[in-house]
Amino acid sequence: MTTLQIIILAIVQGITEFLPISSSGHLILVPELTDWPDQGVMMDVGVHVGTLFAVILYFRNDVWRMLTAFWELLLLKKDYDKSERLILLMVILATIPIVIFGGIAAAYDLPDMLRTIEVIGWTSIIFGLLLYWYDKHSPANFDLSNLKYGHAITIGMAQILSLIPGTSRSGITMTAARALGFSRTDAARFSMLLSIPTIIAAGSLQLLKLLGEPQSQNASVNELLWGAGLAFISAILAISALMKWLERSSMTPFVIYRVALGCVLLFIVYG
């Protein structure tokens, strides 16, 4: 891979992983629109590792509390912080559906069958408009201390839709959280905490695929380090910008971008 390709892929992954505009869709579009060869599974894993460390660093306090709660749960401690254990259990519960359905989908190569510009165009528009509707019309009555099992299951089931390229994992989970009445910042915060086990699960699945297809190892250690590092930096900046933006404004700019992108892609397909 060229240096330019690594830089573009890493920045695209870092920015789009946590913004509600679909990282997988953009990573598919890069080789489609540039005639670059597919970056391969190894580079996909590398840039995902970069974004994983970014979200862990940004939400380090939440992550530390969740790890503490997990340790206390293993030790069966009766004296524990209920709020910390609540977030941990809700994240675990919301992750279960994507692990089950993601494994099934991968076994039948369903995501790969849908990796087309046409699918990404339609999902960008449809799920963008869905995000707009619930962001504009849903109240902001709840924060994460109000999370219940039903909320986690609903958000987790919604996350399954992110298996369709262009849907956006962060976008669909934020949409579900907003539909349930959570504030924009808490919807984003839970979505990003939920991304940690999801990225780990997806990365593990990609590594298993890599072991079965050694010919896909088309990235050197140096390329992987550059990809992971640039994805880390761009992801940190994207998360920080998103959280600050949602404190004072809506999801509308992301919706406009999604609809515009979808229209351009459909024009390419049907025009």
Image: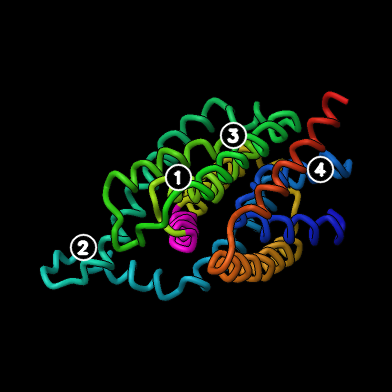
Residue 35 percent across, percent down from the top left: 89, 41
Sequence order check: which comes first, mark 3 or mark 1?
3
Give the side of residue 76 with respect to residue 234, left or right. left
Q: What secondary structure is found at the residue carrying circle 4?
A: helix
Farthest left residue in view = 78
Give the alpha-carbon distance from disc 3 to disc 2, as whole Å.
Answer: 35 Å
The disc labelled 1 sits on which kind of residue? Ala
Q: What label sits on residue 164 in the rendered view? A: 3
Q: Which residue is mark 1?
A: 176
Q: What label sits on residue 74 in the rendered view? A: 2
The magenta segment is 184-197
Q: Is residue 193 magenta?
A: yes
User: Depth-wise, is mark 2 or mark 1 nearer the camera?
Assistant: 1
Is residue 229 visible in the rendered image? The answer is: yes
Quarter of the image for residue 88 reads: bottom left
Sequence order check: which comes first, mark 4 or mark 1?
4
User: Depth-wise, is mark 4 or mark 1 nearer the camera?
Assistant: 1
The disc labelled 2 sits on which kind of residue? Leu
Q: Is residue 204 magenta?
A: no
How crowded is the residue under tag 2: few (<14 C-alpha within 10 Å), some, or many (20+)? few
